[in-house]
Image (spheres, rainbow, N blue to C red):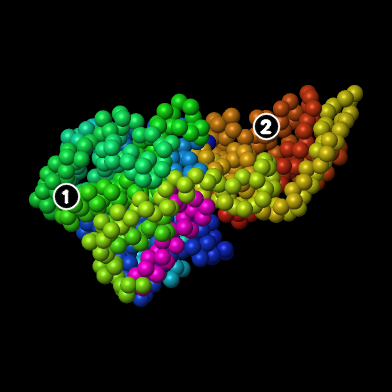
Amino acid sequence: MTELRPLPLSALVTRMFRELDETGSIFDLPRGAFFLGDRERDYSVRFHHKRAATALGPAAGPQSQLAQNIVLSWLGGSRILELKTVQINDELKIPRPCIDMQTVGYNVEWSQELRLEQSLEEYVKAAMLIDMLIASGALELAPGFTDTAWDMSVGYDLAGIRSDRVQTFIDGMLDCTTVVDRLRPQVPEAYRHYRDLDFPARLSDTLTLSTFHGCPPDEIERMIEFLLHKGLHSIVKLNPMLLGPDETRRLLHDELGYDDIRVPDTAFERDTRWDQACGFVERLGTRAATLGLGFGVKFTNTLIVENHRSFFPDDQKEMYLSGPPLHVLAMHLVQQFRATFGDRYAISFSAGIDRKNFSDAVALGLVPVTVCSDLLKPGGYARSRAYLVELRRRMDAVGARNISEFIDKSSTDGYVDGLTKDPRYAKANNVKLPPKIGSALELFDCITCDKCIPVCPNAANFTFVLPALEAPIVKVWREHDRWTTRQEGTLRVEEKHQIGNFADFCNDCGNCDVFCPEDGGPYIVKPRFFGSLADWTTFSALDGFVLEGDTLYGRCNSADYTLQPGAPRSRFTGPGFDLQVDQTDPLDDIQGQASGEIDFTWFHVMRWIRDAVYCDGALHYPALATNYP
C-alpha cells in the first residue's frame, strides 16, 4: 500500500535483540555486513562542531525515513545521518512506482511519506535503538566508533519552514526529551534495563536545507538566515542547474554520451544562476560566522529531466536524475565552487556515490559523503560496508592512519578533469538492464534469489519458511442437500524458502520489481501482510492477510475470507458461505451454509500462512505488529 505505517518501538526492540541473538542479523542485515570500525585507523571527520566516526551517511531519502532504515544505515558504517526531508505539506500523493533503478537512476519521489509528527518520532526511535545496541555490548565497536551526527533536513519554502508544525518538528529535534520520555515505557519488559538509559536530549542542531527546483535565490537566502537565527548550523543543498544549460548538456551529451537525456530549458530558466548562488553564499557565510555557527553547501540535488521512459505513470512529464551522470555534474560544481571560494566553506556531497568513488570524495575533503541510489541496488544496505573497506585499503596504500592525512584538496582538479574520461560514468556502461529470465512470479515458490529483500529500503520484503506441502484444488458446492466436490489439480509448495511483503513498510516504489529476475513484482504478487485489520479493510483493492485475535483475514483474487481455528472444527467463511470444517480433513463432514461454489484452495493457503508467519515466537513483522499493536 502507498501509506507507510511505522512499527512501535516495542516491536522494533524485540525484533532487533532477538534476531541478533538467534540469527546474528538485525532487520535482515547479516552481522558480516556490519562495519564496526577498527583500532588501527581513524575514519573520523568534523561535521560542523561535532566529531563523526565516518564521513559516510545515507542521503536524505528512503534509507533515512523509518526507524529501522536508519538503524540499518548506521550498522553499515554511516555516522552522519542525513534524515529524510520534511515539509509542511506532509500528505502528498506520490506517483507509483516512484523509483527507477534499471539504469542510472530516476525518481519522482522527493519528500517524506510520513506526517511531521511521525517523522520526529521515527528519528528519535532510531536514536534510542542505536543507543540500546551500543549499551548492550553485543557489537564489537572500535573505540570512538559510536560518534554519530544526526542532520535534519527541511524544505521547501520560507512559509512552510516558519509554520507552527515545522517549527515544532525542529524544536523537537533540538530537545526531544518529551518524545524520549513518552517512548521509554514502550521498551518491552524483557529489556526494561534499557528504559533508563541516558538517551540524547538534543538529537540534532544541524540542518541541510532542501529547496524546490526553481526556488528563487532570495527565498533560499531568507530560509537559511531564518535557520541560522534559530541557532542551527546550516547547509544549503544546491541544484546541478548551476552549471548552466551549455555546460550541463556538453557534459551529458558530448562527453558522457547520454543523448537520450533531455534537460528542459525551463529547468534553467526558473532556477538559481551561479552568480546568484555565489552572492548568497558569501552573505550567508558572513552571517553564520558572526553568529558562531557552521555554514556550507551541498552538491547536489537531483537533475530535472524529461520523462522519456515508460517506467513512471504517463502523467509524469518530468523526473529526477541521479547516479553516475549526476556524479560528473556535481563534481564539476565542486571544482567550480573551490575555484571561487577555496576552502572557506564546507562542502557536503551526494551524487552517484558508490564503492569505487567514495574514497575519492573523502580524499577531496567532502563531509559528509552521502548515498542513496547505490544502496537501492542488489545488496542494499550491505553495500555500504564495502565503501569503508575500500577506504581502508586506499588509506593503507598511502600510509594514512586518519582522514586528515588522507585528504588532498589540491587533487580536486585532477579528479574532476578525469571523470569524463572514465568509462564507468558514460552511457555505454550504464544501459544494461537487470536480467529477467522470462518466468512469472506466483504466490508461492520462486527462484529464491532473495534480491527483493535487500533492495527494499524499508525492509518490507521478508522470508518465511514453509515445508514441502500439497493440497488438492477442490471446488465444493451444495446440491440436493449434500456436498458435491470436483478436483481440478493439486496445489504444491516445493520450496522451503518463501517471500512475503509487509504492507505497512511498502510504499509501492517498485524497486524490488526492477531487480527481481521474474516478472510480476514481489510487492504485487507475493503474499502481502497488513499490520492492522483497519488497513486490510481500508485498502480493499489489495489482496493480503492480517491476523486479528485468533482469526486470519485473507483477501485472495479480490474475494474476502476468514479462518478461525477451533476444536474440533474451524470456521471458514468467504463469498456466499459460512462453514465449520475439520482442520486436518476439511472435506470430511462439512457443516454450514453456502449459496454457490467454494474454492477450498484458500482454506489451505490461509492455514499454511497462519502457521508459518504467525506461529508462536515469530519475528516476522506481521506477527510483531499483531503482538505489539
From this viewpoint, is residue 342 visible? yes
Hey, which residue is sitting farthest left in the picture?
290
| Three-letter code for the amino acid on which mark 1 is drawn | Thr
Query: Residue 225 appears in which quarter of the rendering?
Result: top left
Q: Is residue 197 left or right of residue 365?
A: right
Q: Is residue 41 left or right of residue 489?
A: left
Q: Residue at x 65, y 34 (%)?
A: 555
Tell me where the magenta segment starts and ends, as one range: 371-396
Magenta highlight on residue 372? yes
Tell me, for residue 133, which label it has, or none.
none
Position above or below: 334 against 163 = below
| Three-letter code for the amino acid on which mark 2 is drawn | Asn
Q: Position of residue 40 (x, y in %)?
A: 35, 76
Asked if labels 2 and 1 touch by Cβ distance under 8 angstroms, the answer is: no
Query: Residue 52 appears in which quarter of the rendering?
Result: bottom left
Magenta highlight on residue 375? yes
Q: Residue at x 16, y 50 (%)?
A: 340
| Disc on the earlier residue, 1 or 2 | 1
User: Which residue is tagged 2?
Assistant: 557
Q: CA distance from mark 1 to mark 2?
A: 62 Å
Tell me, for residue 340, which label it has, or none.
1
Task: Between residue 192 and residue 448, name the one nearer to us.
Answer: 448
From this viewpoint, is residue 568 visible? no
Q: Position of residue 64 (x, y in %)?
A: 39, 49
Disc 2 crowd, CA 10 A, few/some/many (<14, 14-19, 20+): few
Position above or below: 612 against 194 = above
Q: Is residue 47 left or right of residue 313?
A: left
Q: Position of residue 250 (x, y in %)?
A: 32, 41
Query: Which of the two discs, 1 and 2, sits closer to the camera?
Result: 1
